[in-house]
Image (cartoon, helix red, strand yellow):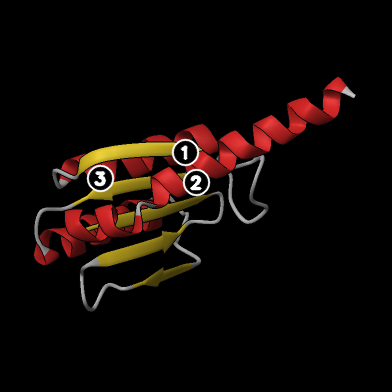
Amino acid sequence: MNLEKLTALVIEGLEDVKAEDIVELDIRDVADYADLMIVASGTTSRQVKAIAARVVEYAKEAGEPPVGVEGEDQGEWVLIDLGMIVVHVMLPWVREYYAIEKLWSADLTAERQVASDTSDS
């Protein structure tokens, strides 16, 4: 399955269980383990678990089972590794505390800046 189809599948799974604040980050330039990171929130631990379960279910049905799933027991932060895409489903306070999309956005900006500085030489 190509990246666009897998992304659409993940977004559909997230939206199906009412995930909030869905953010996609293209990490191809700064990571070699995935092409895209998708971050979303659930309002309760139960919803975080349900969102993650739905994404996993959709992926399996499409013949793209996850490489791994972490954190589903606690339901505060569930990571789903789909190979090309890493999905983070978090409670809002966990998402705010770790601020991974800000961290990765900063890394992406720094990477672009280094690349443009190097090309100016």
Q: Which of the numbered marks, if any, corresponds to residue 25?
A: 1
Residue 119, by quadrant, is top right
SS at badge 3: helix
Q: Which of 16 and 75 is in front in this view?
A: 75
Residue drawn at 22 percent across, 67 percent down: 76
Horizontal arrangement in the rendering, residue 89 relative to residue 108 (left or right): left
Q: Earlier in the sequence, mark 1 or mark 3?
A: 3
Where in the figure is residue 24, as x and y percent of width and height? 41, 37
Residue that mark 2 sits on: 104
Number of residues whose C-alpha sits closer than 10 Å to that of mark 2, classed few (under 14), some (14–19) or many (20 or more): some
Task: Calculate the distance from the C-alpha at mark 1 to the C-alpha at mark 3.
Answer: 15 Å
Residue drawn at 47 percent across, 38 percent down: 25
Horizontal arrangement in the rendering, residue 99 relative to residue 43 (left or right): right
SS at badge 1: strand
Residue that mark 3 sits on: 14
Identify the amino acid type marked 1.
Leu
Where in the figure is residue 66, as x and y percent of width and height? 45, 62
Identify the amino acid type marked 2.
Trp
Quarter of the image containing the C terminus?
top right
| Image depth: mark 2 or mark 1 in front | 2
Regarding residue 38, the answer to whether it shows in the image is yes
Q: Are marks 2 and 1 in contact (CB under 8 Å)?
A: yes
| Image depth: mark 1 or mark 3 in front | 1
Outermost residue toward the top in this view: 120
Outermost residue toward the right in this view: 121
Task: Calculate the distance from the C-alpha at mark 3 to the C-alpha at mark 2.
Answer: 21 Å
Residue drawn at 35 percent across, 44 percent down: 10
In the displayed structure, 39 sits above or below 94; it is above
| Image depth: mark 3 or mark 2 in front | 2
Where in the figure is residue 9, as x and y percent of width and height? 36, 40
